[in-house]
Image (cartoon, rainbow, N blue to C red):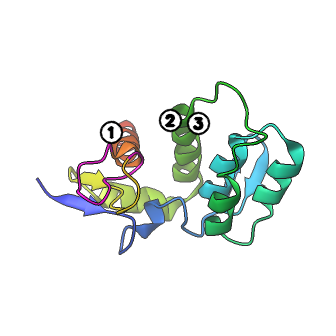
Amino acid sequence: MKKIGFYEGSFYMLSNFSAHEVLYKGVLYKTSEHAYQVAKFEDQTLKAKIADAASAYLAREYGQSPEGRGKNIDKVATMKEIMRAKLEQHADVKRSLIETGDSIIEKNHPLDSFWGTGSDGMGENVMGKIWMELRNEISK
């Protein structure tokens, strides 16, 4: 079965770092990465810092703080909500997802073995699995 990676390349718009604003829980974020990182926190100062970050990379960096985080955040469910919002709000993302056909979608990031496939390709690939689940939903 064909595999499609989206960390870089023509399917990059599936990445949380792509330049697609996302309206999530009534707030417009610069990227889905901004939305996800903000969602992990209760501390309003940190949330504002992350939301205002100049790039998705900085939003991710600020979001690594262990302080001010919310309790009992379901990170996979939260990510799925944000990815679904991005998909529903951007026709080009939807087209790109449909173009993957029945391929296996992978976040082919060498340093991320939870959301992606990791350096050995054996990571959990949670983001890829979410994209495939969302693809199945819109194909019905």
Query: Is residue 118 visible to us here?
Result: yes
For the residues bearing labels 1 and 3, Cβ distance under 8 angstroms: no
Q: Identify the residue at image location x=88%, y=44%.
A: 44
Mark 2 lies on residue: 76
Which residue is at 34% across, 42% downward?
A: 129
Q: Nearer the viewer, residue 70 or 13?
A: 70
Tell me if residue 71 comes above or below residue 32 in the rendering. above
Q: Give whichever of 24, 76 is nearer the camera.
A: 76
Q: Residue at x 58, y 36 (%)?
A: 78
Q: Is residue 120 magenta?
A: yes
Could you tell me residue 64's position as x and y percent? 64, 52
Which residue does the numbered mark 1 point to in the structure image? Answer: 136
Element assignment for label 3: helix
Residue type beneath disc 1: Asn
> CA separation, marks 2 and 1?
18 Å
User: Where residue 126 sits: x, y (%)?
Assistant: 38, 42
Determine whether the residue tagged by mark 2 lies in a helix, strand or loop: helix
Does residue 138 appear anywhere in the picture? no
* Bounds of the magenta segment: 114-124
Residue receiving disc 3: 78
Q: Main secondary structure of the magenta part?
A: loop
